[in-house]
Amino acid sequence: MKRIVILISGRGSNMEAIVGACARERWAAEVVAVISNRPDAGGLAFAAQRGIAT
């Protein structure tokens, strides 16, 4: 299984799409971490709520 780390700077809409596709389409991959250059980026909350390291 591939382990994915995603870089975001804001809401993380592309990250949300990737997380959803991994679950919905059963990709052989999982998002294991999300990193942002902004501590207030909205996408960090999305990731944290799903147990993804931020």
Image (cartoon, rainbow, N blue to C red):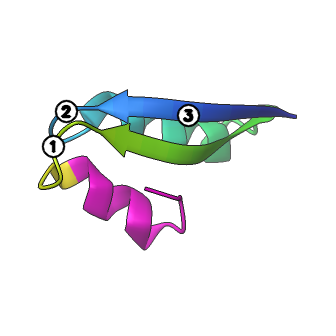
- Give the left or right position of residue 29, taking residue 18 as reference: right
Write the start and end of the magenta stretch as one range. Answer: 43-54
Which mark, residue 5? Answer: 3
Return the residue nearer the eye: 34 or 23: 34
Q: Say which element carries label 1.
A: loop
Residue 3, horizontal then vertical, whole percent:
73, 35
Q: Residue at x 54, y 68 (%)?
A: 51
Is there CB contact under 8 Å for labels 2 and 1? yes
Q: Residue at x 43, y 56 (%)?
A: 54
Q: Secondary structure at mark 2?
A: loop
**In the image, what residue type sits under mark 3?**
Val
Q: What is the spatial separation of the Cα atoms under label 3 and label 2, in whole angstroms?
A: 14 Å
Mark 1: few, some, or many residues within 10 Å (few <14, many ≥20)? few
The crowding category of the residue bearing disc 2, from other C-alpha atoms within 10 Å (few below 14, some 14 to 19, many at least 20), is some
The circle on residue 18 is none
Query: What residue is disc 1 on?
Result: 38
Instruction: Quote the CA–CA distance across marks 1 and 3.
Output: 16 Å
Q: Is residue 36 visible?
A: yes
| C-alpha distance separating marks 2 and 1 | 6 Å
Residue beneath the point at 29% across and 32% down: 8
**Residue identifier under label 2:** 9
| Mark toward the viewer: 2 or 1 | 1
